[in-house]
Image: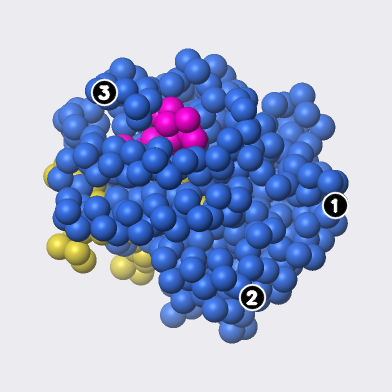
Chain colours: A blue, B yellow
Amino acid sequence: MIHKYQYKDQYLVLDINSGAVHVVNQIVYDILDYYKESPLEEIPELLIEKYGRNDIVEALEDIKYLVDNEMLYSDDSQVTLDMLEGRGAVIKAMCLHVAHDCNMNCKYCFGDKGAFEGVRSLLSLETGMKAIDFLLTNSGTRRNLEIDFFGGEPLMNFDVVKKLVEYGRKEEQVYDKNIRFTITTNGLLLDDAKTDYINENMDNVILSIDGRPEVNDAMRRTVSDKGTYEIITRNYLRFVEKRKGTYYVRGTFTRDNLDFSNDVKHLADLGFKNVSVEPVVTDPSFGYALQDEDKELIFREYDKLTDLYLDYAKNGQKFEFFHFNLDLNQGPCVVKRVSGCGAGTEYVAVSPEGDIYPCHQFVGNQDFKLGNLYEEHFENNRYDEFNKAHIYNKENCRECWAKFYCSGGCHANALHMNQDILKPYELGCELEKKRIECAIAIKAILSCEE
Amino acid sequence: MKNIKTIAKPTLKNTKSNGCGECQTSCQSACKTSCTVANQECENTKRR
């Protein structure tokens, strides 16, 4: 399988099964329209009005070289059933909901303004320690483990966060593990003391902000219905100035700001170097929900973002956009690419009550509760279901060119939109494909300029 | 080759094992609502 597309004056060809990416000239690009369908000797005649015969023959030889070397139209024989379903995945990552409460009242919140369809509550130290024990004892031989302090707003329960980090650091030595702590915050309570602690102890930090003041404040409001832009921007800038490790400012765009490249630009202009702005996924009946007819407008916006990214990179103002960070030559292995996000197999979320779910987006959905930390034994009775929810079992993914880049998409989005984790959310897929095309075009443009 | 510049090698053909599993879980990194796996880093230093 191949995927070819044009980005401005760049002609790009992806060999899906091998991961090879080629920048080609227009002759090759046009020949590929016929290469698999027509006898090779007939192809020069098909294009003779546009190109010289010798040029076509030469291009055909170059194409044949790639085909012979498994870099074009390669098969997927390296993907085995054992790789897809026999990995024996162990739990290695946890989204720990330290607060089912929030000091913001964001209109688009998928977490029921922090409560996740339950009662407002904070994680106790005892339950948090049990969560860490659970991860350490269910992670088999995996050494690198992850715990993301999530909410609601985790800074509302920061003393417990600190004690859990201390506990995790002690226990990881007993089990010979390496726990990477991360935290996702809305920034309202991010004072100097918390900034210093997070800088010292967290491998990655996600700072939520949507972009321009009016865009952010339309959605991200305090419980007393005030805008949050001013205070969180001040807190984030102070935080980032001191930050030595990884961080992302992370926003959401909705139908109300389809010109979201301006929000990315705004965040970059403020000085943030790592930016992620994601499409909202919500009930389609909400006014701010993205609709299918918005697709072309959003595509154009990703094109604008690509131009912006390149301009800034060339002018010494480089910033990273999360979805453009593809590592084409040393990215994840094929196993990772077919096994997906790991929800329900190697990734779980834990609520303040100790309930275990396949991921943070399932929290509160009782149908998907996998167990509770206070139960004597844990048996993941949905393991098979999630383990088999891979790209070869999803009809829409099997023949999709993007399958090894997105790995089948978000299970929760599929469930929310189509009531089936095997049926990906189509608009989400379209936007993902566009982002991948932009990301690869950026690589091609920068590579050709080197 | 005159007509083609390869900017990414066929790396998916070189990783036939069952993986080491030490890499970051994709949703933990920044997205939390969408899914891009290809932008995760490989932790297996032997591949590097």
Quadrant assignment for the C terminus of chain A: bottom left
Q: Which residue is mark 2?
A: A238
What amino acid type should be assigned to the residue bearing mark 2? Arg
Circle 3 SS class: loop
Chain letter for mark 3, please.
Answer: A
Question: Residue A86, position in %: x, y?
Answer: 18, 29
Q: Is residue B6 above or below residue A240?
A: above
User: What label does residue A226 carry, if any?
Assistant: 1
Q: Is residue A241 above or below residue A403?
A: below
- The answer as to whether the residues below labels 2 and 1 share one chain is yes
**What is the spatial separation of the Cα atoms under label 1 and label 3, in whole angstroms?**
45 Å
Q: Which residues are magenta?
A: A346-356
Is residue A359 magenta-colored? no
Q: Quick one: label 2 or label 3, which is nearer the N terminus?
A: 2
Chain letter for mark 1, please.
Answer: A
What amino acid type should be assigned to the residue bearing mark 3? Glu
User: What label does residue A376 carry, if any?
Assistant: 3
